[in-house]
Amino acid sequence: MFRYIESHHNPIIKATIALKQKKHRLLKQCFLLEGERLCQEALNSNIAVLSVFIEESLLNEFRPLLAGLTDVNVYIVNNKIMEKICSTESPQGIAIVAETPSYNPEEFLEPNRFYLLLDSISDPGNMGTIVRTAWALGADGILLYGDCVEPYSPKVVRSSMGGVFNIPIIAVDAHYIDELKKTDFQIYCSDSNATKSYEGFDFSGSIVIAFGSEAHGLSLEIKQICSDSFFIPMIASADSLNVAIASGIIMSKVWSQRR
Amino acid sequence: MFRYIESHHNPIIKATIALKQKKHRLLKQCFLLEGERLCQEALNSNIAVLSVFIEESLLNEFRPLLAGLTDVNVYIVNNKIMEKICSTESPQGIAIVAETPSYNPEEFLEPNRFYLLLDSISDPGNMGTIVRTAWALGADGILLYGDCVEPYSPKVVRSSMGGVFNIPIIAVDAHYIDELKKTDFQIYCSDSNATKSYEGFDFSGSIVIAFGSEAHGLSLEIKQICSDSFFIPMIASADSLNVAIASGIIMSKVWSQRR
């Protein structure tokens, strides 16, 4: 079951390191994750784990994680190779290659779901935090529109704390959103000029809530298709919240109303 | 009013660059901030701006910001010096040295206030986001306990989006918290084992809400002095929220109840 690899010229190692780059992740439909907690979360989730890499000196420590694994390649490597595979400064000695989950966009159209629509969210920390929160607060999925950061990049995966394994995420275009609008879905957004506070807003039914980038807000296309909007009350001198915070506040309200 | 400085060996420039280091910020009781938006926010706030640095090619663009300024040194510098002063990769051509605000801890003890207590929050992005949210959602101040990141470090100042100029922040010790407890203040915390959800929790009166670090949670000392706790409902398989998100959700509820 275990295989030792000693050279970073080994083609398996080279292909794994290549997954740090977006183009290789898209080409292979695989992504990399690292660290004990994240790897455990991946192994407990439904995503398809293809390979596990363990630093040789830590094999006994991580052996319990491997119990019951089948059809998974386990590679034992030295710390130099582990450092090359990992993106963090102090790798924890375990990394995984998993298949990028793929979801059927048709299934997103089922009624009575609550989705987030993220419009060109480019900061990986914000994206990861939003995914983590959406998972914890029971959102049914995330739609990515425009120029969003790739959700399976190492930094997003890390800051999502495993959220990316547990909540469906799909990229959508204007056509898809048009189709969504033809169903029962209502699309709402946060807007500082709205007349209703989120506090009394009705978040029942089939809904999508859109959030735009911090730099540019929502794009015109998305703004135009929203059927209603709400504001988040703030003191007058402050002009905005971080997008992860704003979406967290809204998701907590939606979760309060719907669960 | 303007003074040109052409060498980065100039003692004013050297002293300014030194403020990137914590020990010099603490010694001089000054801090550095950069970028148009943040500098404008600082000039509009009550903090004492000591010096403004402007890149020579952008003087005309930034001149309106300087209107009405008195007792402030304005230094015109070249882009090499600006790069040395700034911490971001693409400096926007304006930076400020301001006095670190100092607040009287006695004044924090006035009744009917709402404070956050942050216990060893070490991530600058989280700290900055929490400060930004606390400002926007009407908290009266922030108490820092244990090993928190310094709130006037460049990254915290940046991610607070000007929050650090606008909300009082003080470092406190166990003795101070004991004194606080002898007044009318109630100290609450978030605890996944609590019996009450935050949704129906009574956040009126003189209150302090404590949040611990993501890695270690609340320290025992702080946990022990809390008179009550609440939980944030989540789906069963998710175990936690980012601390900035959790505090944002709670602050939005407190703000709903108190304003």
Image (spheres, coloured by chain):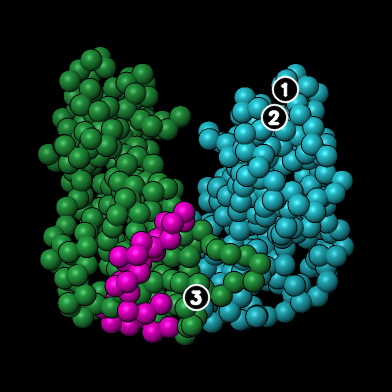
Chain colours: A cyan, B green
- Region rendered in magenta: B201-229
On the image, the x and y values in percent for residue B94 come to 33, 33
Label 2 and label 1: CA atoms lie apart by 6 Å
Q: Are marks 2 and 1 in contact (CB under 8 Å)?
A: yes
On the image, the x and y values in percent for residue B121 come to 38, 53
Callout 2 and callout 1 share a chain: yes
Disc 1 secondary structure class: loop
Residue B184 seen in render:
yes
Q: Is residue B222 magenta?
A: yes
Question: Which residue is denoted by mark 2 in the rendering?
Answer: A77
Question: Which residue is denoted by mark 1 in the rendering?
Answer: A6
Camera-nearest residue between A188 and B70: A188
Q: Are marks 2 and 3 in contact (CB under 8 Å)?
A: no
Q: As displayed, is residue B207 above or below residue A162? A: below
> The C terminus of chain A appears in which quarter of the rendering?
bottom right
Q: Residue at x 78, y 22 (%)?
A: A10
Residue type indicated by callout 2: Val
Circle nearer the N terminus (2, 1): 1
Residue type indicated by callout 1: Glu
Identify the image quadrant of residue A99.
top right
Question: Which residue is denoted by mark 3 in the rendering?
Answer: B193
Camera-nearest residue between A58 and A160: A58
